[in-house]
Amino acid sequence: MRQNRAMLVDILSKEELNPFRIAQEQFDEAAEIMKLDSAARALLREPLRVLEVQIPVKMRNGTVNVFKGFRVQHNDARGPAKGGIRFHPMETLDTVKALAMWMTWKTAVADIPLGGGKGGVICDPKQMNKSELEALSRGYIRAVAKIIGPDNDVPAPDVYTDPQIMAWMMDEYSRLSGKYEPAVITGKPVEVGGSLGRTDATAMGGMYNIREAAKYLKIDLKKAKFAIQGFGNAGSFAAKLISRMFGGKVVAVSDSKGGIYSPSGLDVEKAIHYKESNGSLEGFPGAEKVSNEQLLQLDVDILVPAAIENQLRKDNADKVKAKLVAELANGPTTPEADKILAEKGVFVIPDFLCNSGGVTVSYFEWVQDRYGYFWSEDEVYQYLDKKMTKAFKDVLTTYEDMGKKVNMRMAAYIVAVKKVEHAMRLRGWI
Ligand code: NAD
C-alpha cells in the first residue's frame, strides 16, 4: 500500500514537471485571458502534425540498432515550421511537443514569418562514433523527408546536435531532392550556407533583451552581478558577452557537475579554457564550489538559467535573490515558480522571448540561403538587435497596457498567440 502510494506520488510529481503539460497550462492561461474561441484553443493546444519514425543504423560492432525519432509540427499558419533537433537518451515525445509549441510562440513574438516545430531522436550521442552519428543523422532525414523542406519545415541544431550534423542532414536532403537545398536546415557551417553570427546568436539576443530590461528596471549593468546556470553554447557565450558588452561581473557559472563562485567576479575566458581542458568547471582555481541549487539562490542582480527545464520550482523560487531572471534555457521555470517570482517582484524575461535570438538568426540564414547572398557579421547583429529590441518592447507594452496584472510571460503569450490566431483566421482555418 505504502509502496503504491510512493509510486503514485512519484508519477504525479513527474506529471507536474511534464514540459508538454506545462506548455499547455501556460497556453490555457493566455487563452482564458484573451477569451480565445474554442476552435483556436483546440488547434493551438495540440500540434498540427506528429511523426514518429524508426531509424535503423549499422553500428561499428556489426549489429543494427533501431532508434526512435520524432518530428512535431505544432503550427505553420505564419510560415514553415521551424525548430531544432535534439539527440538525447532521455528524449520523449512530450518534450518534443512542448518545445514545438514554444517555437510557435517564439517565431511569433520575434515576428519572423515562420511557425513552430521540433525534432528529436532517443539516442546517446556520447556513446556513438562519428560514422554512427552520420548514419543516424542521414537516416533521420530520410525518415522525415516527406514532411520537411524549405517551404514546409526547417530544422536546426539543439541539444547534442551541431553544425556538422546539420551539414550531413542538408546533404542527405539535397541528395533526395536531386539539387542543392541549403535552406532546408539552419545552423550549418558557413562554408555550406550557414550564417555568420549564428553560433552566439542565442546569447546575443539574450543580451539585447537584458539591456532593454535593465533600462526599464533602472539596473546599472556596469555594476551588476550575474550568475549563469549552464555553461554550454547559450551559457558560455552569455558569460563572454556580459563582460564584453556591459562590463558587468559574472560571479558564478555552472555545468551539469556543479558550479564555481567568486563574489569579486570570475575570469570568464579562463573558465572557458579550464572547462575545455578539464571537461568540467570542478576545481577552477580562485573560486568557491557551489551546487547548481545554491547558484540559483546567490545574491546577484541578474540570474541567467541557461541549462535545462524545471530549475526554478515551487520548492526553491522563493529563495531567488536576483531582481531580473533572463531565461536563456527553454522552460527553466515551472508555472508554480512563476507565481512565486511575480509575488516577490522578480522581473522575468520569458524563455521564448529571451532566447529567440537563435531562431531569428536561423531565419536570417534561411533568407540568405534562398537568395544566395550572404551578410557580414555586423549586418547580422544589427538586424538581430532591431528584431530583439522590438520584440522586447512589444511584450513590455502589452505588460504595461494590462496594468502589470499579468507577468511578462503571459504578456509574451498574448502577443504571440494573437498573431498566430489572426493568421489562422485570415487563412480560413477557424
Ligand atoms: P549545451 O548542451 O551546449 O549546454 C547545456 C549546458 O547545461 C552544459 O554546460 C551542461 O553541462 C549544463 N547542464 C546540463 N544539465 C545541467 C543541470 N542539471 N544543471 C546545470 N547545468 C546543467 O546546450 P545549449 O545549446 O547551451 O542549450 C541550453 C539551453 O538553452 C537549452 O534549454 C536549450 O533548449 C536552450 N536554447 C539554446 C539555443 C541555442 O541556440 N543553443 C537556442 C534557444 C534555446
Image (cartoon, helix red, strand yellow):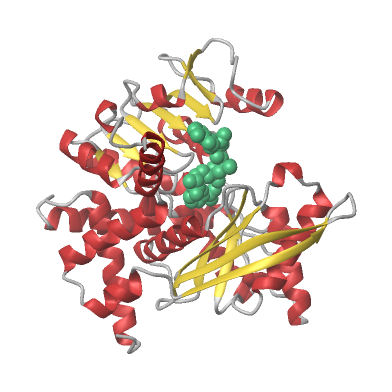
The answer to whether one can see residue 22 in this image is: yes
- Quadrant of the drawing holding the C terminus: bottom left
Point out residue 197 in the picture as x, y percentages from the top left corner: 57, 52
Relative placement, left or right, of 413 versus 308 is: left
- Quadrant of the drawing holding the N terminus: top left
Residue visible at 81% across and 46% down in the picture: 129
Point out residue 368 in the picture as x, y percentages from the top left corner: 59, 69
As drawn, the residue found furthest toward the right would be 62
As drawn, the residue found furthest toward the front would be 1
The answer to whether one can see residue 201 in this image is: no
Point out residue 90 in the picture as x, y percentages from the top left corner: 57, 47
Relative placement, left or right, of 399 versus 284 is: left
Find residue 423 and report its image quarter: bottom left
Q: Is residue 84 above or below residue 90?
A: below
Residue visible at 63% across and 71% down in the picture: 184
Residue visible at 47% across and 41% down in the picture: 308
As drawn, the residue found furthest toward the top would be 286
Q: In this view of the protein, which residue sits in the foreground, 197 or 57?
A: 57
Find residue 51 and report its image quarter: bottom right
Point out residue 137 in the picture as x, y percentages from the top left corner: 72, 60
Relative placement, left or right, of 331 versus 188 is: left
Q: Is residue 354 above or below residue 174?
A: above
Relative placement, left or right, of 217 versus 47 is: left
